[in-house]
Image: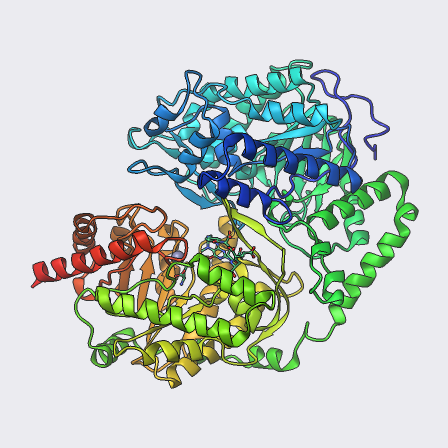
Amino acid sequence: MTTPHERSSISPQGTFPAFPAGTVLGYPRIGPRRELKKAVESFWAGRIDATELEATAATLRKNTRDRLVSLGLSATDAAIPGTFSFYDQVLDAAATVGAVPTRFAGLTDANGTLDLAGYFTVARGAGEDAPLEMTKWFDTNYHYLVPEIGPDTEFRFASDRIVREFAEGLADGVTTRPVLVGPVTFLLLSKAADDAPAGFQPLSRLADLLPVYAQVLTALAAAGATWVQLDEPALVTDNIDVPLADVLTAVTAAYRALATDLTRPTRPAILLGAPFGDLQEALVVVAATDVEALAIDLVKGSAPTGPVAGLETKTLVAGVVDGHNIWRADLSAKLEIVERLQVLGAGAVTVGTSTSLQHVPHTTADEPDLDDTLKSWLAFADEKVTEVVTLAQGLTEGREAIDAQLVAASAAVASRATAAGVVAADVRERTAALADGDFHRGPAAERRAAQAERLNLPLLPTTTIGSFPQTLEIRKARAAHAKGELSLEAYEDEMRAEIKRVVDLQEEIGIDVLVHGEAERNDMVQYFAELLDGFAVTQNGWVQSYGSRCTRPSILWGDVSRPAPMTVRWTEYTQSLSTKPVKGMLTGPVTIMAWSFVRDDIALGETANQIGLALRDEIGDLESAGIAIIQVDEPALRELLPLRKADQAAYLDWSVSSFTLSTAGVRPDTQIHTHLCYSEFGEVIGAIDALDADVTSIEAARSRMEILPDLNASGFSRGVGPGVYDIHSPRVPSQDEVTELLELAVKSVDPALLWVNPDCGLKTRGYAETTPSLKHLVEAARAVRAQLG
Ligand SMILES: CN1c2c(nc(N)[nH]c2=O)NC[C@@H]1CNc1ccc(C(=O)N[C@@H](CCC(=O)N[C@@H](CCC(=O)N[C@@H](CCC(=O)O)C(=O)O)C(=O)O)C(=O)O)cc1
Ligand SMILES: N[C@@H](CCS)C(=O)O
Ligand SMILES: [Zn+2]
């Protein structure tokens, strides 16, 4: 095998510097203490101006470069990726190529350029102008903004921010590798603009887009960039509307224009990144292009076992270090995988991460409270950089050079395999003893009758999804309690006072089924992780979820069980305040897993059943406490859906089973709700039905009830609450608007099955918009009830 250091320039397209021996595909950009979030939110609030925000961002970028160099990535050979973004990398690509929807045209200058304020407006909307839609990024808990492309979208090199950020690094002595979403993925992830003709495919605009990408590459080369990374993750999924043949044709055309027709020194060398899975049929097509390097995911994907034509002129970046999960790598096994890649006949093989590190926290070193043994099993972003550097050294200098690190990594892996709690015999016995009957309730129609009699609800019952605004006071109280400045008793008193306020407000507005508001929850997953055995939580392990919003994914390290009831006393207290039914509120097994870092040592289905059983016990306790309605949220059901269709049935089988395992133990007159949001659920309607919930609330306001005809056509005959209030925007919907959506809903759903609720929880909203919106929702329900007689 040739290593990059032995290699001279080999590209048929000209002379290129060798690719570095080790690299990462991206690095967290929020800052170790969420500095970017704080600066961006200060800018939005008018507390700092654009100059100050730019200065903070520049400092964060410099800190990142310095950190990566200090961890061993080379400063001079493009090993350090330029993956900074103020909000989102897909929005950045749209801003770079001038793809701004016409409703925001007034925000751009004559060249189509958005300033910072304009960029954020496209992301967040303004008044009647809706922001770009947001959806999840492959199988992660990161959400990107969906560009809108029509036949008339004018592509132009509208923002040279990527060039300026490269120049900033160079001036600081670091030759970075600028990173941009590739043109094929950019168009595949875009949606047709509202005014596009029916059937319009954004990918049909590829030929118009490519000259702008060529201009970007030319400008980068002129600024001194030696390598650029174009990310094409859309090539690892077949779960898209465009036929594979069209995608592959597009790849060939795109890289003919960018790699073959543009030669050195007009462009930098191109690394094509393919994170999140196997390229499968796309591999031969990508290998046949004239890009100089290809990064493949060897964690989710596997390497082909024979030679691939075209690789002999390319560097293969072996993505063996997991960019998407936090387990320390077994370096010896990883090195073996890299060594085995020789069979593919690549020009050179180097070491990389499977994905960008943007999906993991900055460093385990910032977790003083984490158990030392557990910490020894973990690698966050900085530790992963070290793993890459070590493996690259092993590859170039031989195993002996990294012997100590290989031994330490193997010891950590062995310690994890045998540690107490990783396998809990009682938990395993319980899951092993599960029988078919544990997963099924009695007939839905009988349940409906029993529940109607017990609950006595009006037609079109109104409810909310669970959370009420997480006010600054709530978060401050929790932070003060965490710092030891507020006693547990005083903190819980504050939470009870908040619950009472929320109950009083719902009573005043006239909502039929009440919630407690989730004030006591820092996050709908982390809260449960803190109360379940088998999980650990972090202090500073923040990961960007979207824009300025972050979460601290919990670490699921051992077998899961519930040492004590989790929500019962809060729910009982809430019920004691009202004669109306109060919904118990839990997060489902799939969502708990999707938003945590999960184990890689046992099947996901086993973990899901362990969580399912813990929730089943909680639901039993809520039921015994007299709670008649229990909601189990599964907003992430669609999120974990495998990117390849062939893998989806098996996933839906275990995920749906874990939900029914958690809920199937209740009496017929206990009403089970579920809630789904953050995704398009059309393609998993069968699975939603199989959840066997009595009522499903589902995001629908923004898409104007799009899902309902499909639900209806599928024969779905359960209670359904399509969201009639889009909570993603501060806009207060008028009573007429909500009425109109409800009228649309009764056209597709039997009114006897219809519920009235917002799209999702209200935790990110303020009371100024929540209160009038809920009033309009209740009034609209009353108006439509009256129409229905
Ligand atoms: C529904 N969504 C969720 C996802 N994943 C989750 N794990 N949880 C989710 O709810 N994925 C899909 C979507 C993504 N949506 C969101 C929506 C909102 C947020 C969000 O608001 N995140 C907050 C952090 C939430 C949190 O952990 N709060 C803690 C800590 C609060 C805090 O920052 N405290 C301050 C001190 C108090 C102060 O002065 O403000 C501090 O510690 O410095 C809590 O409430 O205790 C965010 O800040 O981004 C995320 C995803
Ligand atoms: N019960 C949660 C669901 C969010 S998806 C909430 O209301 O915030
Ligand atoms: Zn939701």
- Residue that sits furthest to the bottom in the current view: 624
Relative to 503, residue 291 above or below: above
In the picture, the quarter occupied by the C terminus is bottom left
Relative to 229, residue 264 above or below: above
Asked which quadrant contains residue 275, the reply is top right
Q: Residue at x 69, y 19 (%)?
A: 224
Using residue 536 as the reference point, say whether residue 789 is left or right of it: left
Relative to 362, residue 49 above or below: above
In the picture, the quarter occupied by the N terminus is top right
Which percent across, then down, holds residue 157? 50, 19
Relative to 526, residue 359 above or below: above
Which percent across, then down, holds residue 578? 28, 77
Q: Residue at x 49, y 60 (%)?
A: 475
Q: Residue at x 42, y 59 (%)?
A: 470
| Closer-to-camera residue (679/657) | 679
Would residue 596 be visible to someone looking at this image? yes
Which percent across, then down, holds residue 121? 40, 35
| Closer-to-camera residue (542/469) | 469
Using residue 117 as the reference point, say whether residue 721 is left or right of it: left
Would residue 693 be visible to someone looking at this image? no
